[in-house]
Protein backbone atom coordinates (compact mmCIF):
# COMPACT_ATOMS: atom_id res chain seq x y z
CA UNK A 1 0.00 0.00 0.00
CA UNK A 2 1.48 3.37 -1.03
CA UNK A 3 1.87 6.30 1.34
CA UNK A 4 -0.69 8.25 -0.68
CA UNK A 5 -3.36 5.54 -0.39
CA UNK A 6 -2.71 5.12 3.35
CA UNK A 7 -3.04 8.87 3.83
CA UNK A 8 -6.29 9.05 1.87
CA UNK A 9 -7.74 6.19 3.94
CA UNK A 10 -6.73 7.83 7.21
CA UNK A 11 -8.18 11.19 6.19
CA UNK A 12 -11.39 9.55 4.97
CA UNK A 13 -11.87 7.70 8.26
CA UNK A 14 -11.07 10.83 10.25
CA UNK A 15 -13.44 12.90 8.13
CA UNK A 16 -16.26 10.38 8.45
CA UNK A 17 -15.81 10.21 12.20
CA UNK A 18 -16.34 13.96 12.43
CA UNK A 19 -19.22 14.16 9.99
CA UNK A 20 -17.09 15.39 7.10
CA UNK A 21 -15.84 18.40 9.06
CA UNK A 22 -12.11 17.97 8.36
CA UNK A 23 -10.22 20.51 6.25
CA UNK A 24 -7.32 18.87 4.45
CA UNK A 25 -5.90 20.14 1.17
CA UNK A 26 -5.03 17.75 -1.66
CA UNK A 27 -1.28 18.37 -1.41
CA UNK A 28 -0.25 16.51 1.73
CA UNK A 29 1.66 13.82 -0.16
CA UNK A 30 4.22 16.34 -1.44
CA UNK A 31 6.75 17.37 1.16
CA UNK A 32 7.78 20.48 -0.79
CA UNK A 33 4.48 21.16 -2.52
CA UNK A 34 1.77 23.71 -1.75
CA UNK A 35 1.31 24.44 1.97
CA UNK A 36 -0.63 21.75 3.81
CA UNK A 37 -2.28 24.37 5.99
CA UNK A 38 -6.06 24.24 5.59
CA UNK A 39 -6.04 28.06 5.47
CA UNK A 40 -4.10 27.98 2.17
CA UNK A 41 -6.10 27.93 -1.05
CA UNK A 42 -4.10 28.40 -4.27
CA UNK A 43 -4.97 31.71 -5.97
CA UNK A 44 -2.49 32.23 -8.77
CA UNK A 45 -1.59 34.56 -11.61
CA UNK A 46 -0.21 33.39 -14.95
CA UNK A 47 3.27 34.33 -16.23
CA UNK A 48 3.87 37.64 -14.51
CA UNK A 49 6.93 39.74 -13.68
CA UNK A 50 8.09 38.85 -10.15
CA UNK A 51 8.76 42.56 -9.59
CA UNK A 52 4.99 43.01 -9.34
CA UNK A 53 4.52 40.27 -6.74
CA UNK A 54 3.79 42.70 -3.91
CA UNK A 55 0.91 44.24 -5.88
CA UNK A 56 -0.55 40.83 -6.63
CA UNK A 57 -0.16 39.77 -3.02
CA UNK A 58 -2.20 42.81 -1.98
CA UNK A 59 -4.93 41.53 -4.33
CA UNK A 60 -5.04 38.20 -2.49
CA UNK A 61 -2.91 36.22 -4.93
CA UNK A 62 -0.47 33.81 -3.30
CA UNK A 63 1.07 31.90 -6.22
CA UNK A 64 2.78 32.56 -9.55
CA UNK A 65 2.39 29.99 -12.33
CA UNK A 66 5.11 30.26 -14.96
CA UNK A 67 8.10 32.60 -15.18
CA UNK A 68 9.19 34.18 -18.45
CA UNK A 69 12.39 32.41 -19.54
CA UNK A 70 12.78 31.21 -15.99
CA UNK A 71 13.06 30.51 -13.26
CA UNK A 72 16.17 32.57 -12.75
CA UNK A 73 18.00 33.32 -9.53
CA UNK A 74 16.73 36.91 -9.65
CA UNK A 75 13.09 35.90 -10.24
CA UNK A 76 13.12 33.46 -7.35
CA UNK A 77 14.77 36.01 -5.06
CA UNK A 78 12.06 38.58 -5.85
CA UNK A 79 9.28 36.10 -5.21
CA UNK A 80 10.90 34.93 -1.99
CA UNK A 81 11.17 38.54 -0.80
CA UNK A 82 7.46 39.07 -1.50
CA UNK A 83 6.43 35.81 0.19
CA UNK A 84 4.97 34.55 -3.09
CA UNK A 85 4.90 30.85 -4.01
CA UNK A 86 5.63 29.67 -7.56
CA UNK A 87 5.06 26.74 -9.88
CA UNK A 88 7.71 26.86 -12.61
CA UNK A 89 9.72 24.83 -15.09
CA UNK A 90 12.29 22.42 -13.78
CA UNK A 91 15.34 24.07 -15.36
CA UNK A 92 18.91 24.33 -14.07
CA UNK A 93 18.22 27.35 -11.85
CA UNK A 94 15.07 25.74 -10.49
CA UNK A 95 16.91 22.61 -9.47
CA UNK A 96 19.70 24.65 -7.91
CA UNK A 97 16.98 26.09 -5.63
CA UNK A 98 15.27 22.77 -4.96
CA UNK A 99 15.55 23.41 -1.21
CA UNK A 100 13.70 26.73 -1.57
CA UNK A 101 10.14 26.57 -0.21
CA UNK A 102 9.20 29.32 -2.67
CA UNK A 103 8.94 26.64 -5.37
CA UNK A 104 5.84 24.52 -4.69
CA UNK A 105 5.54 22.69 -7.99
CA UNK A 106 6.90 22.03 -11.47
CA UNK A 107 5.06 22.48 -14.76
CA UNK A 108 4.91 21.31 -18.36
CA UNK A 109 4.85 23.71 -21.29
CA UNK A 110 1.50 25.40 -21.80
CA UNK A 111 -1.34 23.83 -23.81
CA UNK A 112 0.39 20.81 -25.37
CA UNK A 113 -3.06 19.64 -26.53
CA UNK A 114 -3.24 22.48 -29.07
CA UNK A 115 -1.76 22.39 -32.57
CA UNK A 116 1.94 23.25 -32.24
CA UNK A 117 3.71 25.97 -34.22
CA UNK A 118 6.20 24.75 -36.83
CA UNK A 119 8.00 28.09 -36.76
CA UNK A 120 7.29 31.57 -38.05
CA UNK A 121 5.40 31.40 -41.34
CA UNK A 122 5.43 27.60 -41.38
CA UNK A 123 1.98 26.94 -39.98
CA UNK A 124 1.00 24.42 -37.33
CA UNK A 125 1.52 20.75 -36.79
CA UNK A 126 -0.40 18.34 -34.57
CA UNK A 127 -0.59 18.62 -30.78
CA UNK A 128 2.12 17.10 -28.61
CA UNK A 129 1.26 13.47 -28.06
CA UNK A 130 -0.05 12.49 -24.62
CA UNK A 131 2.67 9.83 -24.48
CA UNK A 132 5.36 12.52 -24.52
CA UNK A 133 3.64 14.44 -21.72
CA UNK A 134 3.50 11.27 -19.63
CA UNK A 135 7.17 10.50 -20.32
CA UNK A 136 8.19 14.05 -19.42
CA UNK A 137 6.14 13.80 -16.24
CA UNK A 138 8.03 10.73 -15.10
CA UNK A 139 11.34 12.47 -15.82
CA UNK A 140 10.32 15.49 -13.74
CA UNK A 141 9.10 13.31 -10.88
CA UNK A 142 12.26 11.19 -10.97
CA UNK A 143 14.40 14.29 -10.43
CA UNK A 144 12.15 15.66 -7.67
CA UNK A 145 9.28 13.55 -6.29
CA UNK A 146 8.61 16.04 -3.48
CA UNK A 147 6.62 18.51 -5.60
CA UNK A 148 3.52 18.06 -7.78
CA UNK A 149 3.61 18.61 -11.55
CA UNK A 150 1.03 20.94 -13.12
CA UNK A 151 -0.28 20.54 -16.66
CA UNK A 152 -2.31 23.40 -18.14
CA UNK A 153 -4.43 22.36 -21.12
CA UNK A 154 -6.34 24.43 -23.65
CA UNK A 155 -10.00 25.14 -24.25
CA UNK A 156 -10.56 21.77 -25.91
CA UNK A 157 -11.08 20.46 -22.37
CA UNK A 158 -14.44 22.24 -22.34
CA UNK A 159 -15.19 22.75 -26.05
CA UNK A 160 -14.85 19.78 -28.40
CA UNK A 161 -15.16 22.04 -31.45
CA UNK A 162 -12.03 24.08 -30.68
CA UNK A 163 -10.27 24.35 -34.06
CA UNK A 164 -7.01 25.23 -32.35
CA UNK A 165 -6.46 21.52 -31.76
CA UNK A 166 -5.93 21.04 -35.49
CA UNK A 167 -6.20 17.39 -36.48
CA UNK A 168 -7.34 16.46 -32.94
CA UNK A 169 -10.41 18.70 -32.98
CA UNK A 170 -13.43 16.77 -31.65
CA UNK A 171 -11.24 14.21 -29.89
CA UNK A 172 -12.01 14.62 -26.17
CA UNK A 173 -10.78 11.06 -25.60
CA UNK A 174 -7.23 12.46 -25.68
CA UNK A 175 -7.64 14.21 -22.34
CA UNK A 176 -7.77 11.25 -19.95
CA UNK A 177 -4.44 10.28 -21.52
CA UNK A 178 -2.91 13.75 -21.12
CA UNK A 179 -3.75 13.97 -17.45
CA UNK A 180 -1.90 10.77 -16.71
CA UNK A 181 1.12 13.06 -17.02
CA UNK A 182 0.42 15.40 -14.13
CA UNK A 183 -0.56 15.75 -10.48
CA UNK A 184 -2.48 19.01 -10.96
CA UNK A 185 -4.70 19.18 -14.05
CA UNK A 186 -5.62 22.68 -15.22
CA UNK A 187 -7.16 24.29 -18.31
CA UNK A 188 -8.25 27.63 -19.73
CA UNK A 189 -11.26 28.94 -21.62
CA UNK A 190 -12.44 32.56 -21.67
CA UNK A 191 -16.11 32.70 -22.73
CA UNK A 192 -16.82 36.35 -21.91
CA UNK A 193 -14.33 37.54 -24.56
CA UNK A 194 -14.58 34.52 -26.86
CA UNK A 195 -14.75 35.17 -30.61
CA UNK A 196 -16.91 32.15 -31.51
CA UNK A 197 -20.72 32.43 -31.09
CA UNK A 198 -20.96 28.90 -29.71
CA UNK A 199 -18.89 29.88 -26.68
CA UNK A 200 -19.15 33.68 -26.46
CA UNK A 201 -21.00 34.76 -23.34
CA UNK A 202 -21.61 31.18 -22.19
CA UNK A 203 -19.80 31.32 -18.87
CA UNK A 204 -20.83 27.74 -18.08
CA UNK A 205 -18.08 26.43 -20.36
CA UNK A 206 -15.72 27.16 -17.46
CA UNK A 207 -17.71 24.86 -15.19
CA UNK A 208 -18.02 22.24 -17.93
CA UNK A 209 -14.23 22.04 -18.27
CA UNK A 210 -13.71 21.73 -14.52
CA UNK A 211 -16.39 19.06 -14.28
CA UNK A 212 -14.76 17.09 -17.09
CA UNK A 213 -11.30 17.23 -15.51
CA UNK A 214 -12.73 16.05 -12.19
CA UNK A 215 -14.40 13.16 -13.98
CA UNK A 216 -11.39 12.28 -16.11
CA UNK A 217 -9.11 12.26 -13.06
CA UNK A 218 -11.73 10.22 -11.18
CA UNK A 219 -11.42 12.81 -8.41
CA UNK A 220 -7.91 11.52 -7.61
CA UNK A 221 -5.95 14.58 -8.68
CA UNK A 222 -6.22 18.27 -7.92
CA UNK A 223 -8.02 20.27 -10.62
CA UNK A 224 -7.28 23.94 -11.23
CA UNK A 225 -8.48 26.33 -13.91
CA UNK A 226 -7.83 29.75 -15.40
CA UNK A 227 -10.10 32.77 -15.00
CA UNK A 228 -10.40 35.70 -17.43
CA UNK A 229 -10.39 39.29 -16.17
CA UNK A 230 -9.12 41.39 -19.12
CA UNK A 231 -9.99 41.97 -22.78
CA UNK A 232 -7.26 39.51 -23.84
CA UNK A 233 -7.68 39.80 -27.66
CA UNK A 234 -11.16 41.37 -27.71
CA UNK A 235 -11.14 45.18 -28.06
CA UNK A 236 -14.95 45.38 -27.84
CA UNK A 237 -15.66 43.59 -24.58
CA UNK A 238 -14.32 41.99 -21.45
CA UNK A 239 -15.80 40.10 -18.53
CA UNK A 240 -17.60 42.23 -15.98
CA UNK A 241 -16.67 41.92 -12.29
CA UNK A 242 -19.98 40.09 -11.79
CA UNK A 243 -19.12 37.59 -14.52
CA UNK A 244 -15.64 37.04 -13.10
CA UNK A 245 -17.15 36.27 -9.70
CA UNK A 246 -19.56 33.86 -11.34
CA UNK A 247 -16.76 32.06 -13.22
CA UNK A 248 -14.77 31.76 -9.99
CA UNK A 249 -17.61 30.22 -8.00
CA UNK A 250 -18.80 28.06 -10.89
CA UNK A 251 -15.28 26.64 -10.88
CA UNK A 252 -15.13 26.01 -7.15
CA UNK A 253 -18.63 24.55 -6.95
CA UNK A 254 -17.76 22.08 -9.72
CA UNK A 255 -14.57 20.92 -8.04
CA UNK A 256 -11.71 23.29 -8.80
CA UNK A 257 -9.10 23.38 -6.03
CA UNK A 258 -7.02 26.25 -7.43
CA UNK A 259 -7.52 29.36 -9.56
CA UNK A 260 -5.14 31.00 -12.05
CA UNK A 261 -6.02 34.53 -13.18
CA UNK A 262 -5.04 35.30 -16.77
CA UNK A 263 -4.23 39.01 -16.76
CA UNK A 264 -2.54 39.63 -20.14
CA UNK A 265 -4.19 41.89 -22.72
CA UNK A 266 -3.26 42.43 -26.40
CA UNK A 267 -6.09 44.75 -27.46
CA UNK A 268 -6.26 47.68 -27.79
CA UNK A 269 -2.54 47.45 -26.92
CA UNK A 270 -0.31 44.91 -25.21
CA UNK A 271 -0.36 45.03 -21.43
CA UNK A 272 1.24 42.13 -19.57
CA UNK A 273 -0.45 43.03 -16.29
CA UNK A 274 -3.73 44.58 -17.44
CA UNK A 275 -5.51 43.62 -14.21
CA UNK A 276 -3.24 45.99 -12.29
CA UNK A 277 -4.21 48.79 -14.71
CA UNK A 278 -7.95 48.32 -14.19
CA UNK A 279 -8.99 49.73 -10.78
CA UNK A 280 -12.59 48.46 -10.97
CA UNK A 281 -11.62 44.90 -11.90
CA UNK A 282 -8.67 44.85 -9.50
CA UNK A 283 -10.97 45.87 -6.64
CA UNK A 284 -13.48 43.17 -7.60
CA UNK A 285 -10.84 40.44 -7.92
CA UNK A 286 -9.35 41.47 -4.59
CA UNK A 287 -12.77 41.17 -2.94
CA UNK A 288 -13.35 37.75 -4.51
CA UNK A 289 -9.94 36.53 -3.37
CA UNK A 290 -10.40 37.77 0.18
CA UNK A 291 -13.65 35.84 0.45
CA UNK A 292 -11.96 32.69 -0.84
CA UNK A 293 -9.14 33.12 1.67
CA UNK A 294 -11.67 33.61 4.46
CA UNK A 295 -13.48 30.45 3.39
CA UNK A 296 -10.33 28.41 2.63
CA UNK A 297 -10.79 25.94 5.54
CA UNK A 298 -14.34 25.35 4.32
CA UNK A 299 -13.28 24.94 0.69
CA UNK A 300 -10.53 22.52 1.74
CA UNK A 301 -13.01 20.34 3.63
CA UNK A 302 -14.78 17.38 1.98
CA UNK A 303 -17.90 17.87 -0.12
CA UNK A 304 -20.99 16.58 1.66
CA UNK A 305 -23.04 14.53 -0.78
CA UNK A 306 -26.80 13.97 -0.95
CA UNK A 307 -27.74 16.58 1.66
CA UNK A 308 -29.27 19.33 -0.49
CA UNK A 309 -31.82 19.42 -3.30
CA UNK A 310 -32.45 22.46 -5.50
CA UNK A 311 -35.10 23.28 -8.06
CA UNK A 312 -35.32 26.32 -10.33
CA UNK A 313 -38.51 28.17 -11.22
CA UNK A 314 -36.94 28.94 -14.60
CA UNK A 315 -35.95 25.65 -16.24
CA UNK A 316 -33.60 27.48 -18.59
CA UNK A 317 -31.56 28.70 -15.59
CA UNK A 318 -30.41 25.68 -13.55
CA UNK A 319 -28.70 26.33 -10.23
CA UNK A 320 -25.62 24.33 -9.25
CA UNK A 321 -24.76 23.71 -5.59
CA UNK A 322 -22.06 22.41 -3.28
CA UNK A 323 -22.39 21.62 0.43
CA UNK A 324 -19.58 21.58 2.98
CA UNK A 325 -19.36 21.52 6.77
CA UNK A 326 -16.83 23.25 8.98
CA UNK A 327 -16.64 24.01 12.70
CA UNK A 328 -20.26 23.23 13.42
CA UNK A 329 -21.75 25.05 10.45
CA UNK A 330 -23.18 23.91 7.12
CA UNK A 331 -22.25 25.91 4.02
CA UNK A 332 -24.29 25.85 0.82
CA UNK A 333 -22.66 27.38 -2.26
CA UNK A 334 -25.00 28.11 -5.19
CA UNK A 335 -24.59 29.65 -8.66
CA UNK A 336 -26.93 30.37 -11.55
CA UNK A 337 -25.60 28.41 -14.54
CA UNK A 338 -27.21 30.46 -17.31
CA UNK A 339 -27.91 34.11 -18.01
CA UNK A 340 -31.42 34.77 -16.75
CA UNK A 341 -33.48 35.26 -13.60
CA UNK A 342 -34.90 32.48 -11.47
CA UNK A 343 -36.11 31.62 -8.00
CA UNK A 344 -34.34 28.64 -6.50
CA UNK A 345 -35.94 26.42 -3.89
CA UNK A 346 -33.44 24.64 -1.65
CA UNK A 347 -34.09 21.67 0.61
CA UNK A 348 -31.37 21.02 3.19
CA UNK A 349 -32.58 17.63 4.27
CA UNK A 350 -30.95 17.53 7.69
CA UNK A 351 -32.34 20.86 8.93
CA UNK A 352 -35.52 20.40 10.90
CA UNK A 353 -37.87 22.91 12.47
CA UNK A 354 -37.72 26.64 11.86
CA UNK A 355 -34.45 28.56 11.65
CA UNK A 356 -32.70 31.23 9.62
CA UNK A 357 -29.85 30.98 7.18
CA UNK A 358 -27.17 33.65 6.70
CA UNK A 359 -26.30 34.83 3.19
CA UNK A 360 -22.56 35.42 3.45
CA UNK A 361 -21.37 38.84 2.30
CA UNK A 362 -24.87 40.17 1.61
CA UNK A 363 -25.92 41.36 5.07
CA UNK A 364 -29.19 39.43 5.05
CA UNK A 365 -30.79 36.26 6.35
CA UNK A 366 -33.53 34.00 4.98
CA UNK A 367 -36.19 32.15 6.91
CA UNK A 368 -35.98 28.37 6.69
CA UNK A 369 -38.80 25.96 7.48
CA UNK A 370 -37.92 22.28 7.89
CA UNK A 371 -34.81 22.82 5.82
CA UNK A 372 -36.60 24.50 2.89
CA UNK A 373 -35.99 28.07 1.74
CA UNK A 374 -36.09 30.15 -1.45
CA UNK A 375 -33.87 32.83 -2.95
CA UNK A 376 -33.80 34.91 -6.13
CA UNK A 377 -30.96 34.63 -8.63
CA UNK A 378 -30.43 37.34 -11.21
CA UNK A 379 -28.20 36.63 -14.23
CA UNK A 380 -25.01 34.81 -13.21
CA UNK A 381 -25.65 35.35 -9.51
CA UNK A 382 -23.76 33.56 -6.76
CA UNK A 383 -25.07 33.13 -3.21
CA UNK A 384 -23.25 31.50 -0.31
CA UNK A 385 -25.32 30.35 2.66
CA UNK A 386 -24.30 29.39 6.17
CA UNK A 387 -26.38 27.87 8.94
CA UNK A 388 -25.07 26.99 12.37
CA UNK A 389 -25.76 23.38 13.22
CA UNK A 390 -27.98 22.82 16.26
CA UNK A 391 -26.79 20.52 19.00
CA UNK A 392 -28.78 17.31 19.36
Image (cartoon, rainbow, N blue to C red):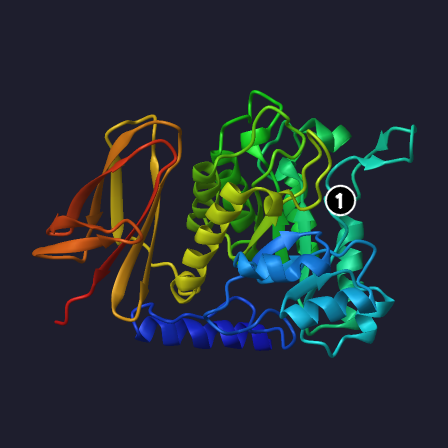
Q: Residue furthest left?
A: 353
Residue 234: in sight, yes or no?
Answer: yes
Q: Secondary structure at mark 1?
A: loop
Determine whether 175 is above or below 26 in the image: above
Please identify the quarter of the rendering in which residue 75 is found: bottom right
Please identify the quarter of the rendering in which residue 102 is found: bottom right
Q: Residue at x 90, y 35 (%)?
A: 118
Determine whether 179 is above or below 240 in the image: below
- Residue 146 lies, in percent from the top left, at 68, 74
- Residue 272 lies, in percent from the top left, at 71, 44
Mark 1 crowd level (few <14, some 14–19, many ≥20, 10 Å Cα): many
For the N terminus, the image quarter is bottom right
- Residue 165 lies, in percent from the top left, at 73, 33
Q: Nearer the viewer, residue 237 or 123?
A: 237
Residue 1: in sight, yes or no?
Answer: no
Q: Nearer the viewer, residue 62 or 307?
A: 62
Identify the residue position indicated by label 1 in the image.
112
Relative to 279, 313 lies left or right: left
- Residue 392 lies, in percent from the top left, at 12, 71
Relative to 301, 165 lies left or right: right
Q: Residue at x 28, y 49 (%)?
A: 362
Please identify the quarter of the rendering in which residue 299 is found: bottom left
Relative to 47, 316 lies left or right: left
Amino acid sequence: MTLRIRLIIVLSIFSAALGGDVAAGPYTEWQSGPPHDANFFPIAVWLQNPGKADKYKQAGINTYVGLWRGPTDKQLAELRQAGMKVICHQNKAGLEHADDSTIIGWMHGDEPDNAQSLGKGKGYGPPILPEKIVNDYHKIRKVDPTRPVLLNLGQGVAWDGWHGRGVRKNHPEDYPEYIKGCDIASFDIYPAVHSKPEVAGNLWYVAKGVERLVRWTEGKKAVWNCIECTRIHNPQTKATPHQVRCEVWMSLIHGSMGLIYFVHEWEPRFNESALLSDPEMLSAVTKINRQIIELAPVLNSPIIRDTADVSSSNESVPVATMVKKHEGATYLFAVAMREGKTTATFDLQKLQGRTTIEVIGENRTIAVKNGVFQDIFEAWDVHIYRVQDTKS
